[in-house]
Image (cartoon, helix red, strand yellow):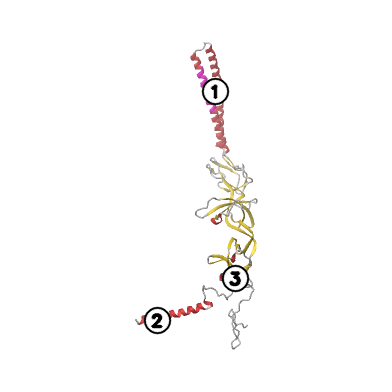
Amino acid sequence: MKKVLITLGLVAFLGALGWQIYQKATASPQGQVGRPRPANLAVAVEVAPVKKGSIQEIGRFTGSLLPSSEFLVAPKISGRLEKLLVQIGDRVEGGQLIAVLDDEEYRQQVSQARAELEVAQANLQERGNMLENAQREYQRTVALRQKKIASESQLDAAESGYKAEQAKQRVATAQVAQKDAALKAAEVRLSYTRIQVPENNVPGPRVVGERFVDQGAMLPPNKPIVSILDIATLRAVIYVIERDYSKIQPGLEAVITTDAFPARIFSGRVLRIAPILKETSREARVEIAVPNPDQLLKPGMFIRARIAFARRDQATVVPVTALLKRDGREGLFLADLEAKRAAFVPVEVGIVTETEAEILSPPLSGSVVTLGQHLLEDGAAIILPGSPAQAGPERPEDDQGKTPRQADGSSGKS
């Protein structure tokens, strides 16, 4: 019981001692934590004038370059690659021959189809002669029947023979058309052995981007040989978030930069905007057309794009560092340079850039606090750059004639 009483007394003593220390600390200026700064204690600040000028909202994005068109050149038939006439980086044009397949088999098919067509044409000619004979025989039998010389059965036989020859004539004609189509198909297959760059109405040359096979390889149908790129105009693909989506419009100008050419600036224009935002990222795809007449830019390069959304002239502009929030309201401290006091003014902000902010309301003039405003209260005293600091109470020299210590702790003696 005695130990318990001693312990309780010790705890009460330490609690009272701690409370006294806390009161002394909070009562002294050095011990104030999270309490308002006294109104009579000035705060050193930096100020900047409120300006009238132009301000522009710039959107900054990153993305990649893509060719305006890209396609693979592949054979439509199988065969051995006999010749490959282009390499990576070569310029090509529509209709240019770039590869040749072994065509011996297809030439033989063309010769066979041509011979079969000739046989069908000869058969058609023979059927034409036989049809003429059958027609004359039928006409002669009709005349004899009218004179009661030929019998009815003879007339029927002549008519049947004539109709049979007409049917054979139609069959022979169809066979000629069939063989002619077979010949044309064989000629088309033969033309497939000469692989050319497709015509797609793209002005200017294109380049070979990749090569997938070597000369002498056996190729199945649709096996890619090379890829062809159009890089006269590139597409810069960027992704914008929901906040900026409504600001992007087709036709907006864009400034493109890349690490490959840090000193160069390339111009572009917004070409198209995706009508949807991806649910996973809440971003929409935007394509920017970038002219590339010198072909310095290449597909796959990382780029930075700046797009001007809006511009206002004769706007009220302050440094963006002047803005802060107090009690959920956005505002700034307006500095009275004569009275050396600062007043908090709630504001409505418009365009905000990296360095400046547009103030829509209320009308402002004068100077605003740009540094030290977080230590201020409404109506607080301020110390401007170049002004003497407020001096503390004077201390008399001690009996030995020593001067009081300076603010940095030095004695003041040299």
Checking the image for residue 245, the label placed there is none
Residue found 54% across the figure and 23% down from its top:
127
Q: Which is closer to the viewer, label 3 or label 2?
A: 3
Callout 1 crowding tier (Cα within 10 Å): few <14, some 14–19, many ≥20:
many
Residue 254 location in percent, x, y? 61, 54
Q: What secondary structure is marked by label 2? A: helix
Residue 337 location in percent, x, y? 63, 71
Please tell me in which quadrant of the rendered image residue 388 appears: bottom right
Q: Which residue is mark 2?
A: 9
Q: CA distance from mark 3 to mark 2?
A: 52 Å
Name the residue at the top extreme.
Answer: 148
Q: Is residue 86 magenta?
A: no
Q: Magenta stretch?
A: 158-174
Question: Do we see residue 131 in this rendering?
Answer: yes
- 198 is higher (above) or lower (below) than 406: above
Q: Which is closer to the viewer, label 3 or label 1?
A: 3
Q: CA distance from mark 3 to mark 1?
A: 114 Å
Residue found 58% across the figure and 62% down from its top:
348
Main structural element of the magenta stretch: helix, strand or loop?
Answer: helix
Callout 2 crowding tier (Cα within 10 Å): few <14, some 14–19, many ≥20:
few
Q: What secondary structure is marked by label 1? A: helix
Amino acid found under the numbered disc labelled 3: Ala
Quarter of the image that includes the N terminus: bottom left
Residue found 40% across the figure and 81% down from its top:
9
Amino acid found under the numbered disc labelled 1: Arg
Q: Which residue is mark 1?
A: 127
In this rendered view, identify the residue nearer to me: 412 or 192: 412
Quarter of the image that includes the C terminus: bottom right
Residue found 41% across the figure and 80% down from its top:
12
Q: Which residue is mark 3?
A: 342
Amino acid found under the numbered disc labelled 2: Gly
In this rendered view, identify the residue nearer to me: 139 or 337: 337
